[in-house]
Image (tube, rainbow, N blue to C red):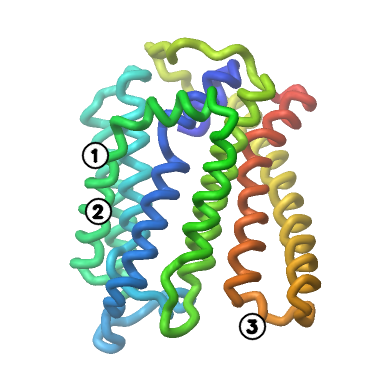
């Protein structure tokens, strides 16, 4: 699917397709609700033993619902819903791919000992409800993104307040940091699309996306071009991430008079949420605005 998007020459079509897919907004919403639900329900992960845990980093998090199951379900099925009326392919094949992808992710969480079957089912059901409730608003959000000059204020302020007022846990866990990272990246992507349209960095809007009758085959030239664009884009994104993170931490450490490189200080609410939010909002904007500009400059589009 990534190569299919790269084959579309018109950057406006690409931007509208990506927004329409709802991948970033869907995951942003799904992950926030899932992570908050964990810290409200406070259901423990499977007991160890008898379960053998193969993953150690997120043991401090609670288990219900599985946000991996939620993200996999949201990404695969929003992609299916958004492409089935734009590209000619067997719907059953697309449905099978969505089911297989989300099922493999869910089974991996059982295999690594991080979730119970109930955690997985809870995550999938919550995601299904969220998709059903938000689907009618996708077109409205798309139009607001393109038209309203106040849209970027809401995109930044609302997610930041949600992250800053994240439920307080009994002990530190990476859930707040992970949630802020994902929500900020989604906000940055959405803001990047708004910048592209408001400042006319892309071609004039088209009333609708045409149906592409045949999916372009994956050729060697297309693969090389895709890999080149990926490498150029990822290097710029990593550079922006490193610079913004370092600068934001220095400003916050100076403001709150904290010793630099203090690991515990980085976990404080007033430092962790702002630096994560600023860093990954910048990453999202870079990915959707500056990376395509660099691709055009280098003649890769």
- Residue 132 — which label? 1
Residue 193, compared with residue 127, is above or below; it is above
- Badge 1: how crowded within 10 Å, few (<14), some, or many (20+)? few
Q: Earlier in the sequence, mark 1 or mark 2?
A: 2
Q: Indicate the position of residue 24 as horizontal and vertical percent values.
A: 47, 42
- Residue 264 — which label? 3
Q: Secondary structure at mark 1?
A: helix
Name the residue located 30 percent from the left edge and 69 percent from the top edge: 111
| For the residues bearing labels 1 and 2, Cβ distance under 8 angstroms | no
Residue 259, compared with residue 128, is above or below; it is below
Which residue is disc 2 drawn over? 126
Name the residue located 60 percent from the left edge and 76 percent from the top edge: 267
Residue 144, compared with residue 70, is above or below; it is above
- Badge 2: how crowded within 10 Å, few (<14), some, or many (20+)? some
Q: Indicate the position of residue 230 as horizontal and vertical percent values.
A: 64, 39
Along the horizontal axis of the image, is 15 left or right of 170? Answer: right
Q: Indicate the position of residue 101 as horizontal and vertical percent values.
A: 32, 47
Along the horizontal axis of the image, is 128 left or right of 75? Answer: left
Looking at the picture, tell me which residue is in the foreground, 81 or 37. 37
> Toward which corner of the image does residue 35 lie, by quadrant?
bottom left
Q: Residue furthest bottom?
A: 49
Distance Cα–Cα, label 2 vs label 3: 34 Å
Q: Secondary structure at mark 3?
A: helix
Quadrant in which the C terminus is drawn? top right
Along the horizontal axis of the image, is 279 left or right of 84? Answer: right
Distance Cα–Cα, label 1 vs label 3: 41 Å
């Amino acid at each position: 699917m990534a190569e299919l998007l790269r084959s579309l020459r018109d950057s406006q079509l690409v931007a509208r397709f990506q927004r329409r897919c709802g991948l970033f907004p869907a995951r942003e919403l799904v992950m926030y609700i899932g992570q908050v639900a964990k810290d409200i329900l406070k259901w423990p992960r499977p007991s160890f033993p008898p379960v053998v845990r193969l993953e150690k980093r997120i043991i401090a998090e609670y288990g219900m619902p599985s946000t991996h199951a939620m993200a996999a379900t949201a990404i695969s099925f929003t992609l299916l819903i958004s492409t089935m009326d734009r590209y000619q392919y067997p719907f059953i094949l697309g449905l099978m791919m969505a089911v297989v992808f989300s099922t493999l992710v869910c089974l991996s969480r059982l295999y690594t000992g991080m979730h119970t079957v109930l955690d997985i089912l809870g995550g999938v059901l919550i995601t299904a409800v969220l998709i059903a409730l938000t689907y009618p608003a996708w077109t409205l959000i798309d139009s607001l993104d393109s038209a309203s000059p106040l849209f970027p204020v809401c995109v930044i302020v609302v997610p930041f307040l949600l992250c800053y007022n994240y439920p307080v846990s009994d002990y530190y866990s990476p859930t707040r940091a992970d949630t802020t990272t994902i929500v900020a990246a989604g906000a940055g992507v959405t803001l990047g699309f708004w910048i592209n349209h408001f400042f006319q960095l892309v071609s004039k809007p088209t009333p609708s996306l045409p149906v592409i009758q045949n999916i372009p085959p994956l050729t060697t030239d297309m693969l090389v071009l895709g890999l080149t664009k990926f490498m150029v884009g990822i290097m710029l994104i990593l550079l922006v991430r490193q610079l913004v993170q370092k600068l934001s931490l220095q400003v916050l450490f100076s403001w709150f008079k904290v010793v630099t490189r203090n690991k515990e200080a980085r976990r404080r609410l007033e430092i962790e949420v702002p630096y994560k939010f600023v860093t990954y909002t910048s990453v999202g904007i870079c990915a959707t605005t500056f990376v395509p500009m660099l691709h055009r400059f280098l003649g890769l589009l």
